Image (tube, rainbow, N blue to C red):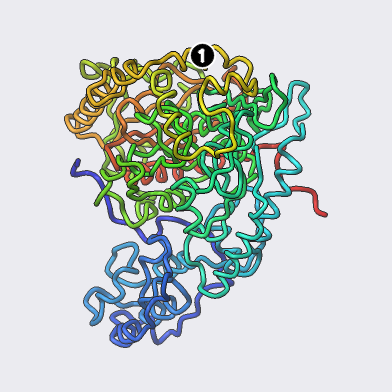
Amino acid sequence: MPSTRRRALAATTVTCALALGGLVAVPAANAAAGTDTAAAAAAAAAAPAPAAGTFLAPYWVELDLTGDRQVTADDLEVLSSVLGATSASSGWSSISVADGDDDGVITISDVAALSQRIVYDDGPFEIVEASVVTMQAAMNAGVTTSVELTQDYLDRIAAYDTTKVDPAGNGRPLRSIITTSQVALAAAAEADATRASDGMTDMLLGVPIAVKDNYDTVDMPTTGGCGCWDGNQTTTDAAMVAGLRASGAVILAKASLDEFAFGFASEFSSYQPAGTSTLVASPYVTSQTAGGSSGGTGAAIAANLAGIGFGTDTGGSIRIPSSFNQLVGVRPTVGLASRDGIIPLALSQDTGGPIARTVTDAAVALDSVTGVDAADPVTAEQQGLVPESYTSFLDADALAGTRIGYVTSMVSTNRTTARLFAEALVTLQAQGATVVPISTPPSGFAAVLAEGSGSTNEFKHDLDAYVARHLAPNVEARSLQGVLASGMYVPSRAGTYRSRDAVTEATYQGWAGPTGTHTTAIANGHALVTSMLEDQDLDTLIYPSGNPYAAFSTNMRLSPNTGMPAVTVPMGQATDADGTVTGAGVNLEFLGRDYAEGDLLGLAYAFEQATGPSQSRTAPTYYGPLPAG
């Protein structure tokens, strides 16, 4: 690891802007420099033990001074009572964690920073653009409930998803949701009951989530976007869905996708007459695609139809819709999250991950879906490599002292993309990063980008395994031949299904077997790019995730062709002067070493904070708050 990589968190890392009803009143007698901290230490030692099962993301609990794994008014009282204490004071070790600016003295700034860790707010709540922290604050304060949040999102889906609200003549409905859960409100009521009895047990407690409709769910069919599987009601959840439910999240809906996750168009046939299909629209410019294959997830989260979304990525299917819809997307290391119960496209490269409106939301969401799963053996590799929480990496100063490389040929000449990337480089440098242009990458780098997707040679083999383990017994289309025979699929895909069905087991093994050409190419790509990072002492490689409503070259292939993780974050939008597609978003992508998701989220968070909300993300014009009543 480069020596410049930073781990320490400043107390002012995340500004949650949670109102506490006024400043903390501190008796003047306690403000004298050198105040004895023995009483505060004794109070902390006498604190009650943590409630059984309570778990909050470490960022919000690491400044706990009373030992109950929460930051509450009790902690503020402890810290306020020792204002003016210094590193020379007795008992300093019991409060030093709250010296956020590391100046060796407890000041009112430290108290204010500590107060920002209290996830509590009695102010007004607006669901549009609400973050997980805002939702938790409002639910903790009783300003709203999970039931109300869930109903609000269901109302927004009903009002916005299938209705043309863009007045442009070529505008289209979003069509981002395939199914909503009939038990979501009951799950939300359960979350509210948990909060009432045990407090906020998890940062996802009661948060409504939409998952791509290739994730198995026991309460909704899993169609894969294909009408041929409209009746696929599985008896188990996908492993990642199970993780979300265990955290108390509400699985709200199944998001639309490109049928069987093949491409970037996000065209699906679920619950439509034979021979017909529908395209998902971007909420920013509804005549444009939301990207794919997780386009429904991208459109839904951008339009505020759910709190957080999950997609899958084989060759760009999380990162493309994130870029098209001004969202944060995480393509994890293959092996970080189990793929069991997700309809596969190509298991050599498939991985699932969050799509969210902020880096913080993405980090919170990722926490709930990691873990070793015997049903997906590659997850065994993560042992000892997963932090307690990815939120612990969210440092606004994470870019300081880093070395960031970019391959010059991966930067598009598109006017919007070139402008935004140049501005991003300035931002990175202003935050203390050293930016290293690489005009001549190592020999073999072009071959890494040129390696194709596994979807052609692997789909039939991997789909057959899913059918055998998960497909509901009543579904008749149990093979690609069955899909074709059903007539219930995107009409333009017939040739694709025939060619995929013609792939033999020998071809599959020669491609994706233990010594297959594709298996070898991914291993070689991983070794080459890892060595590239090490040789130049780089923390990450960056590149644009695409152009306005378009992919760029083979940029999306770098992560899947190495198995290495990538985080994509908005870097701005197209303007009229660009002459491209005004308002279209373009993202900056950070790629790093295996299981370095935390580092990448930290860098993306620091970039997000430096660019500011108006540049990093804008809310879609036509999908604002619903009319009152």
Horizontally, residue 329 falls left or right of residue 283, namely left
What residue lies at 48% left-to-right and 40% top-to-bottom? 470
The residue that disc 1 covers is: 498
Quadrant of the rendering where the N terminus is positioned: top left
Which image quarter: residue 331? top left
* Image spot of residue 607 (x, y percent): 42, 41
Residue 408: in sight, yes or no?
no
Residue at horizontal 41%, vertical 74%? Answer: 52
Residue 156 location (% of width, % of height) = 71, 46
Classify residue 495 by image quadrant.
top right
Q: How many numbered markers are drawn?
A: 1
Indicate the position of residue 512 as horizontal and vertical percent values.
31, 23
SS of the residue at dot 1? helix
Rendered-image quadrant of the C terminus: bottom right
**Residue type pointed to by label 1:** Arg
- Kindly tell me whether residue 409 is visible in this rendering: yes
State the image coordinates of residue 336 (x, y, percent, origin top left).
Answer: 34, 43
Of residue 624 and residue 155, the one placed in the foreground of this image is 155
Label 1 Cα neighbours within 10 Å, binned few <14 / some 14-19 / many ≥20: some
- Outermost residue to the right: 629
Residue at (50, 38) in percent of width and height? 311
Q: Is residue 168 shown above or below 385?
A: above
Image-based side of 612 in relation to 538, left or right: right
